[in-house]
Image (cartoon, grey):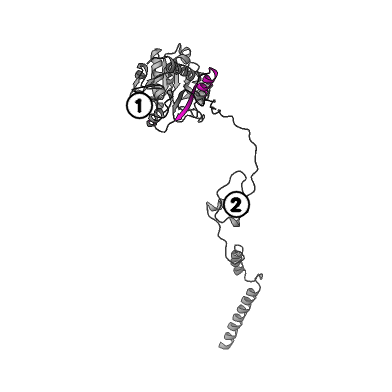
Amino acid sequence: MAFFSFLFILFVFMAIVKNVNKKLNNPEDTSFDSMDRADGDVKDNEDADGFPPIEPSEPYQRRYEEAKNPDPVFEEEPFENESSFQEPAAQETVEQEPVEQPVKPKPAPAAPNADRLFGLIGKPLAHSTSMVRFNNLFREQHINACYRNFELDDIEQVRDLVDNNPNLCGFNVTIPFKQDIIPYLTRLDETAQAIGAVNTVKVVHKESGTELIGYNTDWIGFTVSFKELLEGHSKALILGTGGVSKAVKYALDKLGIENRFVSRNSTFDIMGYYELSPSVIDEYDIIVNCTPMGMWPQTNQCPDIPYTFLSERHVLLDVIANPDETLFMKKGREHGATVKGGKDMLEQQAVAAWDIWNSIEI
């Protein structure tokens, strides 16, 4: 009996060995279904070397897909192993209509050997049209003079400017030096002293030395340019607290118009922009922008005031001369307000400065 049991076990063992060898020699054989299913799961995910591929992880998965199908509009920086990917397709050039931008002022030709030199100090100066205006004036009236821009990194450089230009007869002052210039002056005109800011300097050369006398013509330009629009209005908000805002306050005080400063840094006397509620905007029907927000080339900027509270009762004035219409003015016009920019103000203050350089006796 034991002998027959041994023969049966041997027969089964040989059958198993035979089927295993057959499976190894013929992978397509479908015997032993359970083994085939397990084996098939591996084969579906194996590459030619018999190892399952490693899928790229995020964010490399996204870059991998983009490398295979490059987007003609947006390109990521190249994947580290670029050789394994398809070369990105050439981008198609699409012609777009040019966007109209404010034109940068072009300097007018100046007399190369002018007897008298005038100029403008500040930084930046690319927006200024003063050089163009004055040199055109000199050429048209046959005046042997020249007007130049002097962009200073520091107000201390004004000393070298005066020392190195013995024919310098006067200069205008713009941001950010309208208050910083005062300690470098010999004396101040009464109005400039009251305002606390200077935009015009007369240079007087004497045997005893050179004198620098400070004046302010911004308030004159503001009054002449905007007085007519201010009639019938009684309260004004002055945006900004720099040199030109002080001249505007002086002019409004002279006109009998109550006013308050508005700034990002509020104090007891200065309102914050966050305080401009509907009731405040309704109370103050004049708003004057004395900040550089919106000045060329940053023409897409404007002061952060609640424009939706404006109405046809309001007057919005901008001391910026370039561009002709700032975003501040455009937003005001959209809500019915009367608006005016600083181009005329600039011309009027320049006339006053020229009068100082030529007519006022020291």
Disc 2, SS: helix
* Observer able to see residue 156: yes
- Identify which residue, 215 or 205, lies in the foreground: 205
Query: Mark 2 is on which residue type?
Result: Ala
99 or 143: which is nearer to us? Answer: 143
Disc 1 vs disc 2: which is toward the camera?
1
The quarter of the picture where the C terminus appears is: top left
Quadrant into which the N terminus falls: bottom right
Please give the range of residues in magenta.
Answer: 132-155
Give the image location of residue 128, x and y in percent: 49, 26
Q: Amino acid at mark 1?
A: Tyr
| Nearer-the-camera pick, 348 or 261 | 348
Residues at discs 1 and 2 in contact (Cβ within 8 Å): no
Q: Position of residue 52 (x, y in %)?
A: 57, 63
Mark 1: secondary structure = helix
Q: How far apart are labels 1 and 2 at the CA level?
A: 63 Å
Task: Please tell me whether residue 4 is drawn above or below residue 35 in the rendered image.
Answer: below
Mark 2 closeness class: few <14, some 14–19, many ≥20 residues within 10 Å: many
Circle number at residue 67: 2
Residue 86: where, in percent of width, then height?
63, 54
Task: Give how far across and how far down residue 185 sits, in percent.
Answer: 35, 24
The residue positioned 34% from the left and 26% from the top of the image is 183
Where is residue 5, by image quadrant? bottom right
For this orientation, the residue located farthest to the top is 232
Q: Is residue 27 magenta?
A: no
Q: Which mark is residue 184?
A: 1
Q: Nearer the viewer, residue 268 or 216?
A: 216
Left or right, 77 with respect to 303, comes to: right
> Which tag, 1 or 2, sits closer to the chain's start?
2
